[in-house]
């Protein structure tokens, strides 16, 4: 919290931000302004709501501090940047960026809000270092709706690959150097993103659809057509990284592609050893690299799902109950900071206090439990609990009366 202290104009929001981060790290079953304010010992949720809506502080500057904190403590020369999106199912139509759209969280088309994240993935750990809200065309075509949600009348539509490019360039412009980027088919199928990465001298392993056409010395072919022509000796069994139950072994093959532009380009193909299911990746590097490097980079993409799961489960990334964009950006930035704290503590504990052999190393889940139980220890008396019970019931009574008045007016 000391790292971000200078981003607040007054001491009150700075201290309240610290309490909000502790609340995000707590074991509350639901995390929002009401529950966190009660847990933190405040009399009403107004202060937490003010922190997210109107207080004077720079969420983008805090985002930059989170990025520097993560890179400093999780620094790895072989780290990979992973771009991916995650969605939060929402009700109504006034939450910034919400519409009926596909979200992997639900696995179907739902009324949801989707954001693209940039994750720094290294050997010591993984944490999100940037975020951008995806604003659909249905919003950018309606300036009044954007203004009401705090987006600004001049908000322009940007695709998810364009948001990814923006975050990657922001990471590089901050003075950091990284060799590889990976992402799923949404990003691998976008030639503008691939070109932007090549212009910055970055390598990539980006997933593409089986119908993607690639150029070889023999001509253009679909990715699945090339895979069907591979002989048995072209496949190698390699691990894409460790999973919860050990190494994730697949069969892999690589095909050199023809391209007059500088660099080395390949089509990487992954085959499931049990089902035979195939996946395809466009690869590009400035220098020749072994197949194992491409496989390791491709495997880094799967770890982003674990990062999203941890940020949502441990730091309340998706539990915000805010509608306007400024409030959303502040909530998710502080949630990123809370999760980064757990990841950094875990990395340091593994190095300096590995523990006895009969125990697994400390996980982020266990660190969260110990930190809240042994360090924070929020204890509130009965008067505090009763005053919050009265406040909630009074607020709910006003809300119910308001609904009845509205219904009577409509009738």
Image: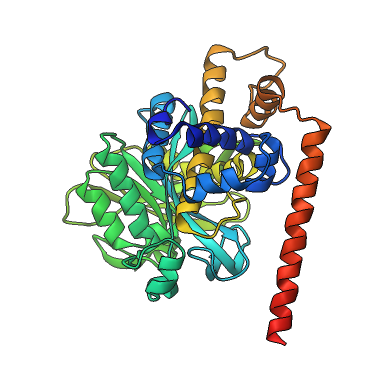
Tag count: 0
Toward the bottom, the furthest residue is 411
Say which residue appears at 66% left-offset and 44% top-offset.
44
Image quarter hosting the C terminus:
bottom right
Q: Where is residue 185 in the image (x, y as percent from the top left)?
A: 43, 59
Can residue 257 be seen at all in this image of the molecule?
no
- 12, above or below 145, in the image: above
Q: Position of residue 16 (x, y in %)?
A: 55, 35
Q: Where is residue 11 in the image (x, y as percent from the top left)?
A: 46, 31
Q: Where is residue 209 in the image (x, y as percent from the top left)?
A: 44, 64
Give left or right: position of 159 versus 348. left
On the image, which quarter does residue 195 sit in? bottom left
State the residue in front, 156 or 206. 156
- 161, above or below 56, in the image: below
State the residue in front, 117 or 274. 117
Give left or right: position of 320 versus 39. left
State the residue in front, 145 or 259. 145
State the residue in front, 404 or 22. 404
Say which residue appears at 53% left-offset and 62% top-offset.
113
Can residue 309 be seen at all in this image of the molecule?
yes
The coloring applied to the image is: rainbow
On the image, which quarter does residue 133 sit in? bottom left
Say which residue appears at 34% left-offset and 48% top-offset.
167
Say which residue appears at 27% left-offset and 50% top-offset.
197
- 35, above or below 346, in the image: below
């Amino acid at each position: 919290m000391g790292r971000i202290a200078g981003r607040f104009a007054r001491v009150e929001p700075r201290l309240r931000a610290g309490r909000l981060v502790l609340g995000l790290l707590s074991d509350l079953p639901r995390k929002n302004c009401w529950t966190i304010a009660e847990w933190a010992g405040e009399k009403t949720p107004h202060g937490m709501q003010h922190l997210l809506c109107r207080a004077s502080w720079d969420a983008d500057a805090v985002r930059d501090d989170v990025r520097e904190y993560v890179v400093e403590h999780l620094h790895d020369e072989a780290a990979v940047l992973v771009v991916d999106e995650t969605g939060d199912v929402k009700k109504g139509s006034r939450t910034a960026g919400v519409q009926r759209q596909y979200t992997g969280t639900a696995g179907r088309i739902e009324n949801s809000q989707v954001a693209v994240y940039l994750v720094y993935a290294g050997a010591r750990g993984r944490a999100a270092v940037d975020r951008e809200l995806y604003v659909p065309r249905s919003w950018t075509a309606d300036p009044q709706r954007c203004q009401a949600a705090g987006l600004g009348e001049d908000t322009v539509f940007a695709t998810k690959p364009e948001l990814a490019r923006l975050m990657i360039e922001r990471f590089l412009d901050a003075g950091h150097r990284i060799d590889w980027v990976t992402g799923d088919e949404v990003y691998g199928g976008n030639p503008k993103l691939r070109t932007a990465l090549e212009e910055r001298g970055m390598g990539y392993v980006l997933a593409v659809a089986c119908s993607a056409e690639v150029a070889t010395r023999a001509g253009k072919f679909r990715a699945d057509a090339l895979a069907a022509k591979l002989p048995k000796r072209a496949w190698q069994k390699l691990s894409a990284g460790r999973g919860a139950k050990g190494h994730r072994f697949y069969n892999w093959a690589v095909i050199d592609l023809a391209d007059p532009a500088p660099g080395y380009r390949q089509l990487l193909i992954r085959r499931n050893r049990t089902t035979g299911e195939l996946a395809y990746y466009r690869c590009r590097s400035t220098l020749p690299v072994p197949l194992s490097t491409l496989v390791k980079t491709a495997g880094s993409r799967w770890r982003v799902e674990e990062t999203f799961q941890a940020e949502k489960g441990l730091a309340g990334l998706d539990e915000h109950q805010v509608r306007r964009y400024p409030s959303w950006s502040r909530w998710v930035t502080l949630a990123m900071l809370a999760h980064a704290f757990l990841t950094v503590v875990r990395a340091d504990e593994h190095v300096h206090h590995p523990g006895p052999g009969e125990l697994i190393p400390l996980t982020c889940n266990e660190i969260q439990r110990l930190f809240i139980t042994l360090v924070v220890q929020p204890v509130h008396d009965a008067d505090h609990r009763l005053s919050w019970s009265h406040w909630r019931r009074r607020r709910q009574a006003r809300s119910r009366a308001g609904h009845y008045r509205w219904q009577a007016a409509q009738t």
